[in-house]
Image (spheres, helix red, strand yellow):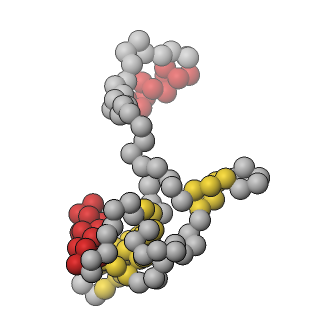
Amino acid sequence: MSPRTAWAICSANSWWSVFAKKRAGRPRPGPPVHDDLLAFEDDKGRTRHDFTAAEQVNTVWLTDITEHKTNEGKLYLCAIKDACSGRIVGYSIDSRMKSKLAVAALNSAVSRRTADDVGVAGCIVHSDGA
């Protein structure tokens, strides 16, 4: 009998297996991997974000990944923008959207801003993705 048929019979008779399904994975210990430092709570209790331009460069960087369709396939662009100056401070382009795309863009931004003798310590990088 197929697993679906067995499930249907058990479900119709309110039978449940004594063998539990394996869990997907163990929960990760410790605090969350990110802090939303741009979030605040408005007067109605909703979480909002403050994306206003910072007073100093390299205080807040905003990033996103866009997908562009070409004749040869898809192309992904990850750009990092400084909220104060409004300039793109780093970017990366690749044919696949993997974590190395974002890491390369961040490395590009850090190396460009470090070359300009402007420190990036304490900079907040905000992305809309999870």
Q: Looking at the image, which residue is at 40% across and 71% down?
A: 58
Question: Is residue 9 shown above or below 29?
Answer: above
Q: Quadrant of the N terminus?
A: top left
Q: Looking at the image, which residue is at 27% across and 77% down?
A: 117
| x then y, percent, for residue 11 | 53, 23
Q: Is residue 55 left or right of residue 82?
A: right
- Front residue of 79/16: it is 79
Given the current orientation, which residue lies at the most extreme top position? 18
Q: Is residue 18 left or right of residue 36?
A: left
- Front residue of 30/2: it is 30
Q: Looking at the image, which residue is at 58% across and 72% down?
A: 52
Residue 101: tell me if it is visible.
no
Q: Looking at the image, which residue is at 27% across and 70% down?
A: 110
Q: Quadrant of the C terminus?
A: bottom left
Q: Quadrant of residue 112?
A: bottom left
Given the current orientation, which residue lies at the most extreme bottom position? 71
| x then y, percent, for residue 12 | 56, 22
- Front residue of 119/12: it is 119
Report the number of numbered marks.
Answer: 0
Q: Quadrant of residue 17?
A: top left
Residue 121: tell me if it is visible.
yes
